[in-house]
Image: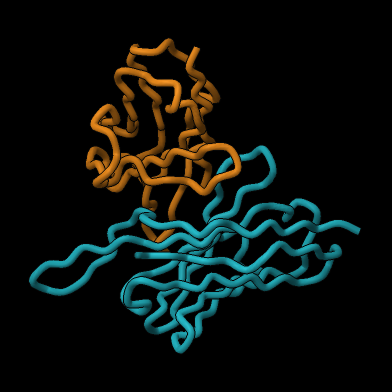
Amino acid sequence: QSALTQPASVSGSPGQSLTISCTGTTSDVGAYNLVSWYQQLPDKAPKLMIFEVSKRPSGVSNRFSGSKSGNTASLTISGLQAEDEADYYCCSYAGTGSRMLFGGGTKLTVL
Amino acid sequence: QVQLVQSGAEVKKPGASVKVSCKASGYTFTEYYMHWVRQAPGQGLEWMGIINPSGGGTSYAQKFQDRVTMTRDASTSTVYLELSSLRSEDTAVYYCARDAIYSDSTGNHRSYFFDYWGQGNLVTVSS
């Protein structure tokens, strides 16, 4: 099964909002409300930012929000800050065999 | 606090096997499934498989089905990933990642996301 599709890179200025998309299929993103998003800083382990499409773990800024429409999930970051510069990965449950699928990752640059 | 502490970096020759470990602490080991995820240099995250620390049941990504073995030792709260027939493309950082759970009137259930990650193990395959 192919990875979920994310844009390779996005950029924005401080204070702006931007959205990262994550496109799958009717067998993964479209089938389950089990999309999660992870932030990865250089040489660090990923950090959970959003789970179950739109829920935020405690401690994650409310500037981060998630949504889903059909086979595409989205991560929106509002009030962009320099510290948000990182790689972001979406992940979806993909059914049979407890499979999990990641997106290819999106490099966020704060201009 | 929850901690997943992985073993150190490894250097292996092509064709060899590697076994990396992930020691859990700060929670009841048998209540949470554990995943293994890898990341090749400069590349994205790739799911390898999952193990149920309670019964030892596993499910592997098709890509690794014939080369990977995930095991656990409940007495030491440790899960293991063994990858055989190593090739250069297996050079990567290997992470263990805990699957979150939620509880309701019927018990604990998987949540299908990763709430804690180990620090990662770099495995280098080179002749």
Asked if residue B110 is positioned above or below residue A48 in the image, the reply reads: below
Residue B66 visible in the snapshot = no
Residue drawn 58% across the image and 41% down it = B44
The quadrant in which residue B55 appears is bottom left
Q: Chain B is drawn in which colour?
A: cyan
Q: Where is residue B74 in the image (x, y as percent from the top left)?
A: 44, 85
Asked where in the image residue B22 lies, by quadrant, the reply is bottom right
Please provide percent x and percent y for residue B78: 50, 78
In the rendered image, what is the letter of the chain coloured orange? Answer: A
Residue at image position (37%, 77%) is B29
> In the current view of this chain or complex, which residue is farthest to the right?
B127
* Residue under the image location 30 percent in, 20 percent down: A78
Residue A64 as seen in the image, left or right of residue B67: left
Q: Is there any visible trace of residue B97 in the rendered image?
A: yes
B36 or B29: nearer the viewer: B29
Report x, y in % for residue B35: 47, 63
Relative placement, left or right, of B122 versus B37 is right
Kindly give the residue lying farthest to the bottom in the view shown.
B75
Find the residue positioned furthest to the front: B1
Counting from the top left corner in percent of width and height, residue A73 is at 33, 32
Location of residue A74 with respect to B3 vertically, above or below = above
Residue A75 is left or right of residue B65, and the answer is left
Tell me the quarter of the picture where residue B52 sits.
bottom left
Nearest the viewer among A12 and B126 is A12
Number of numbered discs visible in the structure rendering: 0
Front residue of this view, candidates B126 and A81: A81
Colour mode of the rendering: by chain
Instruction: Check the image and report above or below for B61 versus B57.
Output: above
Question: Looking at the image, which residue is at 51% across and 41% down?
Answer: A3
